[in-house]
Amino acid sequence: MVKKLAIDWDESELRLVAAQCMGSNVKVTDARVIPIEGKGVLDTLKEALADQGFENTETLVAIGRGQAELRELHLPPVPEEELPDMVRFQAIRSFATAGDNAVVDYLVTNRSESGVEMIAAALEPQELDSLKGICEAVNLVTKRISLRPLAAAALYLLNQGRSGSNDIVLIDLLADDAEIVVARGGRVIFVRTVRMPSVEAGRGRALAGELRRSLVACGSSGTLDRVVLWGRAEVHSQDVEMLSEASGSKVEVLDPFSLVDVDRNAKANMPDHVGRLAPLVGLLVADEAGADRLVDFLNPRERVEEVENPYRKYMIAGISAVLAALLGFMIYRQLDSLDAEIEQLRSANSKKEKEVKSATESIARTEVVDKYLDGDVNWLNEIRRLAEKSPSSDKLIVRRVSAVSDSRNGGGMLSVGGAVTKPAVIDEFEESIRDEFRTVQGDGASEQKTSDTYRWNFAEVIRLSPGYVRDQRYQGISEFAQQADAQLGREEVSKIPKSDATESTAGDEREKPQMTAEQGDGESQGSDGGDVSEKSGDRSPATESASLAEGTPDAEGTPDAEGTPDAEGTPDAEGTPGIADPGKSGSAQSDTETQPESEPETKPETQPESEPETNSDSEIVVEIRPEVKS
């Protein structure tokens, strides 16, 4: 077994524990608390170790909380090997006295997906050299220099640590100080050292108050699992009573030497305040079994440097050469197939080029048509909007409205003249008309010397952008296409037989040829077209088209912009007479004969049962021809 020595001191006393160690097995051979009494630490230590055979003994040194600077750090989640560098970088910025040369070590208290929480400590190089110098002066080999509170906590957590959710408080009473450690889930989360009163009678009450403040500082909530006071029950009976009252939890007095083996002679010569030796016993136990629970300034955590394998570069070079050769062979094997694929792509590309050229020409032609149609403004809609947006008639009257379309550039100009009751109404009028597609420019207000209420004349010019005209046109085309699709869907539904009794009738109707726009054009030029004209009142398609252009009512009976009604009773963009949709007319008449309730909107006249089916088809052809020609 290896002989080891653990020592620490403060202003009033020197404490040491000697033990025989083998792994986690520790057997204490000597334990003493020696008053300094005006002598220096070095002289006291020399007298204590004189003729004891401790020359060149591995020594573990514990230092107090006041000799190092501690901080709680919160870092983002990083790999374990990068943590030492990040802690050192953050410590230089966060610590008040630690410089670039300070020794920094840390103890992780919590690790989660959101980050890493830790207790970091820094010790100045001068202080570290001073501690090592004291050990060297008495021929001791310094192995560790650790924080005293964490060493005592390591002793408890390695032997009796519990993974409960409640907190555990460990208290070590020294001659002038009290060290308080809070552990949660088997990890230290808070460390605090407080100064105690010199009067023995007030120590218990002061300790209870410091315990409450420590629990608040660390954010402890709920009931404590227990409070552990290092020492003997007969020595700390008053302290136990005060702590129990302050924490509301069970207070356990624990002798640190009960957790390790103790030599018979050492047990007989134990000091009264054995709790002060708990950090030293913890150092001896954690030196081999729990060094990760200590903050060690002599052996701080550092980035682990990977030792490069001397054969690694040769292996990498060989693997790279094999992969390159294999890759080259695979490329060589695929060259022929790639050439064939390239040829196929060239052939396909040449075909696509013709299609793209044709599509480009079609787009160019469409753009020319669009530019021409951009000047076709629906002035009725604009005048209706003008009436809706204008102020009320008790403020403004319109006496003159004129509209001019710009066939070259698109859009148009609407000139409005009138009178208002006061000039402010003109501003209100302009703001109500103006939007992102319309600009309003006026000449201001001119007052007329008259007793009329509307004595302020105005003249405004409203310019309509060509983009708005195009958008409205394409929106109307889209709506018409949707209506046509819906109408075709209703026709398909109307063709489904309702019962076995009507199945044969529906079959006969399905056998009859359906007239399409193209068939109508062909038949109107042949002999069948003549028959259709006779059945429809000896009117040829040209005559029918002319009648429609002259203002003949359509399916809805409402005239369009040119005086000719369209299928919906609304003028189209070009002023061309609206044409009834062949699908709508055909389906309306057919549904009237078979199931009139399917189309209540159109309500066509019910044809006699004796009227031939071809009469309905001929009417469809006549109505669709103007639309096909246009």
Image (tube, rainbow, N blue to C red):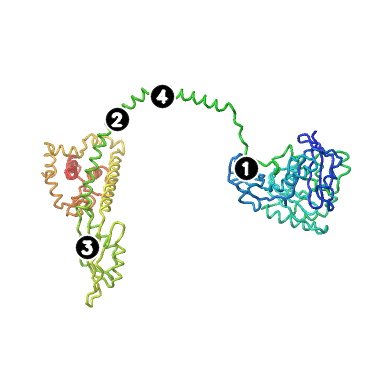
Choose the circle earlier in sequence order: 4 or 1.
1
Q: CA distance from mark 4 to mark 2?
A: 24 Å
The residues tagged by marks 1 and 3 sit, at their Cα atoms, a distance apart of 79 Å
Residue 592 position by quadrant? top left
Labels 4 and 1 touching (C-beta < 8 A): no
Nearer the observer: mark 1 or 3; the answer is: 1
Residue type, numbered disc 1:
Pro
What type is the residue that disc 3 sits on? Ser
Q: Which residue is mark 4?
A: 331
| Circle 2 residues within 10 Å: few <14, some 14–19, many ≥20 | few
The quarter of the image holding the N terminus is top right
Depth-wise, is mark 4 or mark 1 nearer the camera?
1
Q: Secondary structure at mark 4?
A: helix
Q: Which mark is residue 129?
A: none
Q: Residue at x 15, y 49 (%)?
A: 548
The residue carrying mark 3 is 415
Nearer to me, 552 or 455: 455
Residue plotted at (61% across, 32% down): 307
Please indicate whether residue 345 sits to the left or right of residue 414 in the image: right
Q: Amino acid at mark 4?
A: Ile
Structural crowding at the residue carrying mark 1, measured as other residues with C-alpha within 10 Å and reported as few (<14), some (14–19) or many (≥20) = some
For residue 594, side relative to residue 73 (left or right): left
Question: Is the C-beta separation of discs 3 and 4 under 8 Å?
Answer: no
Q: Earlier in the sequence, mark 2 or mark 3?
A: 2
Instruction: Work out which quarter of the rendered image holds the C terminus and state it.
Output: top left
- From the image, tell me which residue sits under label 2: 348
Q: Which residue is labeled 1 in the image? A: 84
* In this view, the mark in front (1 or 2): 1
Q: Which residue is nearer to you in this view: 624 or 380?
A: 380
